[in-house]
Image (spheres, rainbow, N blue to C red):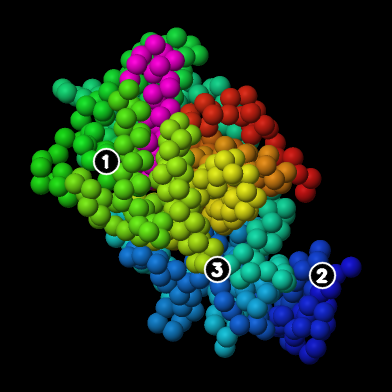
Amino acid sequence: MSQWIVSRQGQQWRICWNNTLVAIAHCHPHAQELMEELEPGVFRWTRTLDQPAQHQEMDVTTCFPCQYAMIPAVSYNGNGWGSDRDYVGFSYQGEPYKLSWHRASVPGATYSGGDGFSVSMFCEEDGGCSLSLLEEGSGRRHRLSWPEEESPRYLAGGHGGQIWGGPITVQRPPRSKFIAYLVLDHDVAPRTGWRKLLDTAWRMHVHPVPCWYDAQTIRQMEIAYTKSLYTREADREAFSIGFTWRDGQWVKRDVIQYEIGWCGQNASLANSLLAYFQETGDTEARDMAIGVLDSWVKHNRLENGLFRVMLDDLPQDKLDKEIQDACNLGTASVQFWEAYDRAKACGLDRPAYAQIAQGIADFACRIQREDGCLGKGWYRDGSLAVAEGTVGAFLIPALLETYRRIPDAKYKNAALAAHAYYMKELEENGYTTAGALDTYCIDKESSMPLLRSSLDLYALTQDPDYLRYAEDAAWYLSTWQWHYSTPYPEGTALRAMHYDTFGGTAVSTAHLHIDPYALHYIPEMLQLAEYTGHLIWKERAAAIWQNATQGISDGNLEVMGKKRPLGSQDEGFMHTRFGDTFQVSQWLVAWPCAFRLEVLRKLGAQISDLESDLKRDT
């Protein structure tokens, strides 16, 4: 029996936990109001007007001091971390923001928590409204308003400087019925009370997104795309960072051309080609992979243990300013360990691969601060360029992989200290930072190594705290995952592609578009499901895979009038008014291909579970 008590008093719905007033829903004087409890703490609030109307507001005021507030995938306690422009605070020049329902990863969702209570509000899947979160004394006023508006301005662009647009209003026919969903919880921490919101929205909207192709077909496509990225210069071999449209054709980008991790993923692509050779005997794949890896060793290995993360041939003045970042370095170490093993399995001895992997781990041990912080980026001489940002956690898996192979306690101790430092950031702030390397803000990517390293540390120590930390990271990652399908108007690329947002993940508070990055942690989500027995992590992994198969070209796919190369896929799907609204980025970058191949080589036959329908009975 629910301990939530709802009573109508005048023009208010008063919602109490036992005898404690938690929230007040404000009624309309000329409407029928219905408040139904669907399950404990989850309410459907239906308002039916006497006459159809275009304008309407449904407000809920909290009755506790707010300690943490969120608009999932848009604002984490008002943002403000870093130097990139995003929605700082919940108003602009004293006017509350109205944001379209499709900006948030749960439709129209707002959350606030404090004093052991939490309140969330969201709308129906097809939205047509705006969300606002207003300060009301020490509490918050959650608002859904019709019609859809974005005011007084909205974040409309990212790369090369953020662009603000607005205001804008989207008129729809008048309506008589308006619906809002309320999710209340008790005995919860303010920075985690939103989990019930995510779980409720997931159960309401979960559905299969049919894979465009089966796993084996995808693998063949992506091997073909990897080979098309392969580039031979006079003194080096590498995989291009991606294709861009220029002068009426797709061409490889000619600046920042080659990268070991992050967008370029040269080491991961090489490992996938080596794995492909091991299974098929494709000598072209093997030779490309070894040629690329050997080029990186020849040109980028530094005596101080650092490793240059770009392979572009640059003049000395630019080399001196170049930053070697933790994301690329951590990735390089883990991937070079794998490359060492795979090369040996192919009959090739490459001790330099292992030396590079260990050298990066040794560098991390040397530069680690006493509080556990590893840093974000360094100049080639090893001097610190940027200290803060959870992205430093990308070095933790490298430390643990090195410890697995070389059981020197310094690697384990450095990993433990770094994990404690960066996990504390997530626990105390309610967000992680600086993982999307072309921004400096709150983001999704920086929490992935916390999920991975938490699972690694649990496997190493069997300490249940690390399993709890892994779920904390997985829940935070899930705030960026789309819990519904956004409808798109005729004439847009996303409508023409029949693109389904469900399961995709947004990038950061400064880059409001969906990408397939979550591919990178599918194996970890499945491992977490196995360790905990919680089905939700397997479901979320399946949704990620299904979503990320959309838009892969079979060589004949035409998007926005441009025929696309075999195996290519966009980096960005503009699910909201950001960049080219409801269109695609037209940037056929290497990393989605690399991450899909990485999932396939790690999971093998397990991938069939992710191809099948999501199984929860809704």
Marks 1 and 3, the one that precedes in the sequence: 3
In magenta segment, residue 346: yes
Expressed as whole percent of the image width and height from the top left, the position of residue 433 reads 42, 58
- The residue to which callout 2 is attached is 36
- Residue at point 44% right, 68% down? 79
Between marks 1 and 3 in the image, the one whose residue lies nearer the viewer: 1
Residue 70 got which mark? 3
Q: Residues within 10 Å of mark 3 (few under 14, many from 20)?
A: many
Between marks 2 and 3 in the image, the one whose residue lies nearer the viewer: 3
**Is disc 2 placed on a helix, strand or loop?**
strand
Expressed as whole percent of the image width and height from the top left, the position of residue 343 reads 39, 18
**Is disc 3 placed on a helix, strand or loop?**
strand
- Residue at point 29% right, 20% down? 291
Marks 2 and 3, the one that precedes in the sequence: 2
Asked whether the viewer can see residue 114, the reply is yes
Q: Given the image, on which type of amino acid does mark 2 rest?
A: Glu
**Is disc 1 placed on a helix, strand or loop?**
loop
How far apart are the two marked residues, 1 and 3, measured between alpha carbons?
A: 38 Å
Q: Does residue 337 appear left or right of residue 44 in this picture?
A: left
Q: Which residues are magenta?
A: 327-350
Of the 4 image quadrants, the one containing the N terminus is: bottom right
How far apart are the two marked residues, 2 and 3, measured between alpha carbons?
A: 25 Å
Who is closer to the viewer here, 319 or 146?
319
Classify 593 as above or below 529: above
Q: Kindly indicate whether the residue at mark 2 contacts the one at mark 1 (C-beta within 8 angstroms).
A: no
In terms of image quadrants, where is residue 338?
top left
